[in-house]
Each structure stands twice: as structure tokens, then as C-alpha cells.
Amino acid sequence: MLTASLAKNATVPAATHAQRYIGFALLAVLSVLVQAFSQERPTMTPEEWKASQSRDRVKEAMQILDDPNWPDGDPWIRYFREEEKHPERTTPGHVKNAIDRRETEALGIVVTSTLSDEQKERLFEKYLRHRNRNVALGSLGELVRRGVWSAERAMDFAEKEWGETNPIALLHSVLNSPKPEAGLAVARRWMLAILNAPEGIQSPGLGSWDYEALRLLVASRDPGDHALIHRAILRYPEEDPLLWLVVSRVPLTKEVRAKAEEVYRDTNHSLSLRCAAAVVLAQNEKEAEDFTVGHIRAFLDEFAGQDLPRRMLAALGGTPVEQIEGAEAYPRYKEHQLLVDMLFLLPSETARKLTFEYLRADDYKIRRTLGYIAVIRWPEQFLDVERETFPDDEAGEFDRLLAALVWHHPHLRDRAVGKSTAEKMETELTRMRESGPAAVCGKSGFPFYELPVDGPIIDRRFGRSGDE
């Protein structure tokens, strides 16, 4: 019935594109309801019925993964193929994207299924030859995550079978591996690939996965891994302020210290790059610390009371930029906003004072950054802050920060719950278990937030320190 309805609707020129999609959605819902109520649920216990549904989902997922012709029998894919004949009604590659997404989702169902570990591992090894590269990579990552394959073996396989020389594709899986050395092996190979590129090759640019690799190398206690970070900054000293901030978390060599001094004093570099290099020197050089603190304070004095990011949202609604108050300063705001994050790394008492002095900032990005820094570095003092400090509290801003405080400092849970509720706390902690505390608090993308100023590395996913 559904297939026939789709075919019929696809030939009705009078229906609009939106109307057809609404109709198909309603038909799909109706089909699901009919199938659900046609199940012989009264003859099963709820547990038996739920288990049968799970088995059916796994069976369907494996059929999608095993049968290269499965799209031919899928009414939605057939509909999308029909739509693709009319470029004005759809986007290029829509069918391929839909197929790739369904197959990737099918692998996810297998991963979370109740199949035995042995059954899953056989399937993952089988799917290494899958036509969909995402499925193959996902299967390879699962074998590493489960400790069946070493990271080195997986990277050798990817390079030999697929010509895949970028091992960062495996990081998403190995970060959650029960064997931490797997992620470290990937990070080492990736950094060596960057550092051993021929001289004269332009830097490829450092992305989020590159910083994940750097974070793992910082966490290592092996001096050889720290040497890779030193080589990275010496080869790409002007690449990104974040790279200098990562370097600030490892012991320095004379050569790296001299390069930091050179970058920080060179007025031809951007202010953010110079301040980041100064952070590397700040622990032992008062002049470098004063340089960075002075520019951070100037930035906060200018922007903390304006809330430019929220104002600029008006431009999305059609308001001309020239009519938005303060819009002319927004490019400078974006260029230098990393200065506020540097308060996380500065070792001085001045950093603490600045953090709490501007905690009531009207600018929500500045306020959330300072709040997140405060809960990690100075949790006891943050617990003395009143909820009214955060004007966006209707959005749960204060409760998220309290949950982040508990995540990083579990011994303070009772005091934090006393300023919130146990229910709100558990809600936010559940979100953090899925995405990490930095992401939930709006601070994802800054790898040094997983690197405490003192003490062991904090695990990104589970909120546990390396010594626990």
C-alpha cells in the first residue's frame, strides 16, 4: 500500500513539494501504527514483545548491510530516485546520502544490539570489505575499541586496503577504547605524518581531530610524545594560537622557549597568536604574563557589557548590519575572543580575580567561558556565586555549570546540589555523559579544557582523572 501510494503521489504534478513530503510522512506514520497494532502483543509479555522488536531491527539492519540491492525494495529510496530526476525539486547526491545514512545507521544497530561479542566481531571483520567506506571504517574502529585489533594493525590495514593514510579517522573510536594506548598509537602516527612531510609543503591546517591527537600526546608521560609537540610548534609556529596553548601544558625546551619569545615580541603577528605564545612563558616571565593579562582586561572592558553576539543575531533576521549597534567592532571581537579562554591557563592570582570580576558579563559567550573556567579552576569560590549572576538562567546556564563542577570535582556534589536540585543535576550530568561537559556548557573545540592546570589529565568522556 505504501509503495503504491508513493508511486501515485510521485506522478501528481499539482501537489507541491512540501505537500508531498507531508503526505509521505503521514503515510509512514500510519503504516507504522498499522504494523504496531497488528502485532500479536496480547500473546507476549512486554519483555518478550520488546525483545522481538529488537531482533527484528537487527535482522533488518543486517539485511541492509548484506544485500547491495536493498535500496531497490525500499519505497523511500525509490521515491528519492524519482525526485532526483527533477533537479529543481531536490539536491544532487540526495539518493547516495540517504543510502549511506541508512547503512551507517544499520551498523549502529548492530553495535548496540544484544548479539554476542563473538557474533559482533565476526560481523565487523566481514564489514571491513563493505562497499560503504563509512561502514568499513566504523567496523574497523569497533575492532580497535574492543581490543580485537591493535591501532597499529588497523592503520596498516586502512593504508594497504584503502590507501587511507590519515589515521585520524580512527580517533573517534579509539578515544573510547578500553585500552588508552590505542588512541596514543593513532596520535603518534598522525603527528609523524604531519611532521615528516617534505619541507616547503604548506601546513595543512590543524582541525579538531588534530587537537584531539595533540591532547593525547600531552596526556602521555613519555618524553618522546612531548618531543612530537615541540617539533609541531617549531615547524608551524604561526599556525594557530591554540597550538601554543597546547604547548603550554608540556615541559619546554630552550628551543621552544626561544621561539615563543620570538613570536610574542613580533608585532607583525596577530594579537591572539602573540598572547598565546606569551602564555607559554608566563609562568617564569612576569613581563609576558602582564602582556597577556593587559590585553585580556582590555578585551573584557570593551566587550563584556555589550553582548555583541546576541545583537548580531538580528542580521539573520534581515536587519542591515550597519543598523546594529556596535557591529563595526564584531570582526575584532571574533578575532580576539580566544583571549578570554587564556585565563584557564594563566597560573597567576590575577587570572582568578579577572575571572570572577567579569563573571556577571552581559555578553553570554564571555560569561559562559568565565563560568566554565571558574568551575574547573576555583570550584569552592564558584559555589559562593549566586544564581542571579547568570541572567540567562531560564535556559539552565547556572545548572549546567554546577553539573560541570560536579563532573570535575565529585567531592563537591552535595554542595552543588544544594544550589540546584538532584533532578536537574542528573539531567545535565546525563547530557554530559553523552557529549562531554565542555560541549554541554558551550565550550567544545578547546582541547586545553581537558588539561587541568595542575594534576592528571581529565578524561573527556567519563569525568575521571588519570589517577583514579
Image: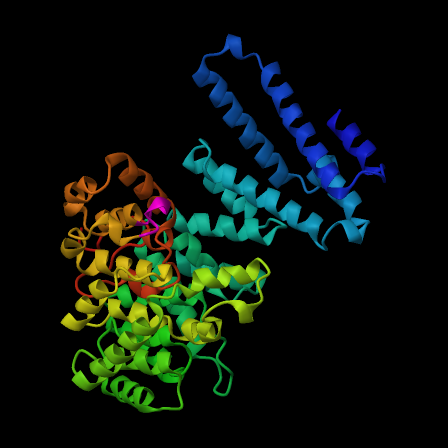
Q: Which residues are magenta?
A: 391-397
**Residue at 36%, 50% in the rendered image:** 440
Residue 75 is left or right of residue 108, and the answer is right
Residue 302 picture quarter: bottom left
Q: Nearer the viewer, residue 146 or 292?
A: 292
**Residue at 42%, 79% in the rendered image:** 239
Reply above or below: 432 against 353. above
Reply above or below: 316 against 121. below
Q: Position of residue 13 (x, y in %)?
A: 85, 40
Q: Nearer the viewer, residue 307 or 132?
A: 307
Residue 385 is left or right of residue 207, and the answer is left
Residue 149 appearing in the image: no
Q: Is residue 394 magenta?
A: yes
Q: Is residue 235 magenta?
A: no
Reply above or below: 349 against 269. above
Q: Residue furthest top?
A: 43
